[in-house]
Image: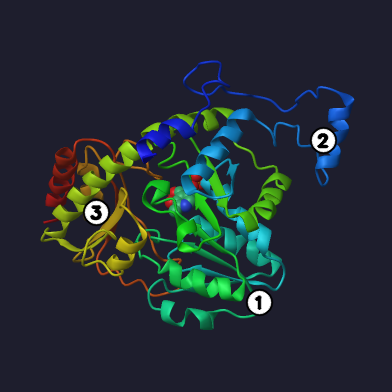
Amino acid sequence: MKIDTKLTKVSRDVKKQKGFINPGIYKGSTMIFNSFEDYINDINNDDDRSTLYGINKNPSVEQLEKAISSLYKCHDTIIAPSGLAALIIPFLTYLKKDDEVLINDTVYSPTRTFCEKILKNYRVKIKYFHPLKDINKFEKLITNKTKLIYLESPGTATFEILDIPKITKIAKKKKIPTVMDNTWASPIFCNPIKLGINIIIDAGTKYINGHSDVLIGFVSTDKKHSKEIRITAKTLGMCPGSEEVYLALRGIPTLNLRMKQIETNTLNMANKLLEHSLIDKVYYPAIPSFPNHNIWKRDFTGSSGLFAFSLKKKHSLKSIKKFYNKLKIFKLGYSWGGFDSLITFPRLSKRSFKNEVKGNLIRVYCGLEDSQDQINDILNALKVLK
Ligand SMILES: Cc1ncc(COP(=O)(O)O)c(C=O)c1O
């Protein structure tokens, strides 16, 4: 079955939904047992807590878990109330006092904040590695205390592509679980399980939902790690809102269409900006001259809507403000993955490795407006920097 057909099937079960096209919304905590025997069986079936309860059993949550597992061809998926809530689950599952975790230095900034502000209090050592320079000596970074490898590819803001198969091969040899934040690619453009990853993070807030009206996160696992991850998530009381689940399911049938259009729009924009006289670099893995472009081509089947460009010189904040204020289509706002084009002004100051960006760095998300309108908007605003 081709992906467009699959996407229309995995998000629903029309028979169970009494003929309705989309799944229902189930709200609630208490669920009533059919009999005393069922109640006793339920207790005996689980380690320490009932499964027949709103946190554990909700028909549309189960439908969404199954849909995401099917798209990632993995064993299980648990759903958290945001991407950030999802990504902390593997840290809390595999790390304890005196352990070490390896993380690429280009990781999503709140992931780093979680490690620095919370994980460190539990005496876990956080070791950041350079996404390009440290790969050939990766094995040397591992000690007998390394208990988790957490990866994000491409990296946040500067989009470095990691050699995931190289890392997972070493991790498997050393029996260390690997996690990859795959939000940028979504299941449409990358399947980290195929690259040897054990646990996938996907902030469904972005592409899966696709309409900027939901916060939701997924942790998708291979068989070996699924039970431990599920226990952590459920012990923490992680469960999504039921309307959010409904909206995420409703986003799935159009996921491929949206991703393809977003890819086209972004490639058009990135290629146009490459030729611009004020621009130094375009940070987008699909550009042939971008570092590790060949690895991206090997491991990904497409490129999504988020990228950055840097200016040749460092313009004053006053000039940069004029540029942002001139934009009509690109709006200043966090997150991405919806139909609206967005723009931000990222700071890289928290990184451990020296920032190699020359001029100002501008992050762009190309949404679903007309491609030429998007290009004209940025080109027009760049004129104020001349
Ligand atoms: C790479 C990446 N992972 C995770 C998240 C967190 O997702 P959420 O906004 O749902 O918490 C984000 C949000 O911007 C992100 O960019």
Whether label 3 lies within 8 Å of ligand 1 gets the answer no
Q: Distance from label 2 to label 1 (Cα)?
A: 38 Å
> What's under tag 1, amino acid-wise?
Lys
Q: Position of residue 159 (x, y in %)?
A: 35, 61
Give residue 42's mark.
Answer: 2
Location of mark 3 (residue): 320
Q: Earlier in the sequence, mark 2 or mark 1?
A: 2
The secondary element bearing badge 2 is classed as helix
Give residue 145's mark.
Answer: 1
> What's under tag 2, amino acid-wise?
Asp
Q: Distance from label 1 to label 3 (Cα)?
A: 45 Å
Answer with the quarter of the image where residue 30 lies: top right
Query: Is residue 240 visible in the rendered structure shown here?
Result: yes
Count the numbered circles shown: 3
Whether label 2 lies within 8 Å of ligand 1 gets the answer no
Q: Position of residue 342 (x, y in %)?
A: 31, 43
Query: Is residue 108 visible in the rendered structure shown here?
Result: no
